[in-house]
Amino acid sequence: MNFLPLNQKQLDAAIVDLDGTMVDTMGDFAESINRMLRDLDLPSIEAARIEPMVGKGSENLLRSVLQHVLAQDDKALAAIKIDALYPAAWDSYQRHYIAINGQYSAVYAGVVDGLQALRAAGLRLACLTNKPTDFAVPLLQAKGLDGFFDHVFGGDAFERKKPDPLPLLKTCEALGTAPARTLMVGDSSNDAQAARAAGCPVVLVTYGYNHGQPVRGVDADGFVDSLAALR
């Protein structure tokens, strides 16, 4: 479905999520996480298990992975083990992710057409992701998407991450646009909750990562099967 306000000239800018919205990065996550787990002498994890954990930042992702592979009945003991392993896990994950960033991922069909359409409509664009900035910027460059964006903000750019509204409000400030005239384009409840709280209209893609839940059950202004529908 098309998002009508785009045609009605009611928008000045759009904020676009990265993982699950523009780029299918599950292969990158699975490869770097399993290299990390091998470094820690821990069992591997399947990509299907990782997918529901994606979206709330790398810190949450790693802790969720460690919780899964440790599989302790005693939650208190598991928490102690996770806390003990986390510094080494983060160092290993960061090293491996930077090394393979973009090699096991692909741009979704329709993304370039959609970004071109948003630009052609006169909208300023920013990429806002919970992914660390040092991961996000090289990924956009590797996939040839960086030139579309006036700003790129990662999960470490502000004091809080989506679903908190702060990153969206700060991104609107950087764009010089009012939240009510700034469209949020994402793939999950994180994006929608942040947009609602910030006062931004929000459209979600139907193909991304929504913590294992049906995305059409999320409170949003519209859903698209491809960013190319944003015309």
Image (cartoon, rainbow, N blue to C red):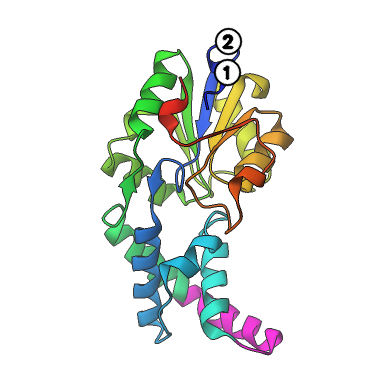
Q: CA distance from mark 1 to mark 2?
A: 6 Å
User: Residue at left 36%, top 81%?
Assistant: 38
Magenta: main secondary structure: helix
- The C terminus, quarter of image: top left
Q: Is residue 150 visible to us here?
A: no
* Mark 2, secondary structure of its residue: loop
The magenta span reads 72-88
User: Residue at left 62%, top 19%?
Assistant: 181
Kind of residue at disc 1: Leu
How far across and how far down the image is residue 99, in percent? 28, 61
Callout 1–callout 2 Cβ contact below 8 Å: yes
Tell which of 3 and 166 is nearer to you.
3
Numbered circle sitting on residue 12: none
Numbered circle sitting on residue 4: 1
54 w.r.t. 125: above or below: below
Please tell me in which quadrant of the rendered image residue 176 appears. top right
Please tell me in which quadrant of the rendered image residue 74 appears. bottom right
User: Residue at left 53%, top 31%?
Assistant: 15
Q: State yes or no: residue 25 in magenta.
A: no
- Mark 1 surroundings within 10 Å by alpha-carbon count, few (fewer than 14), some (14 through 19), many (20 or more): few
Which residue does the numbered mark 2 point to in the structure image? Answer: 8
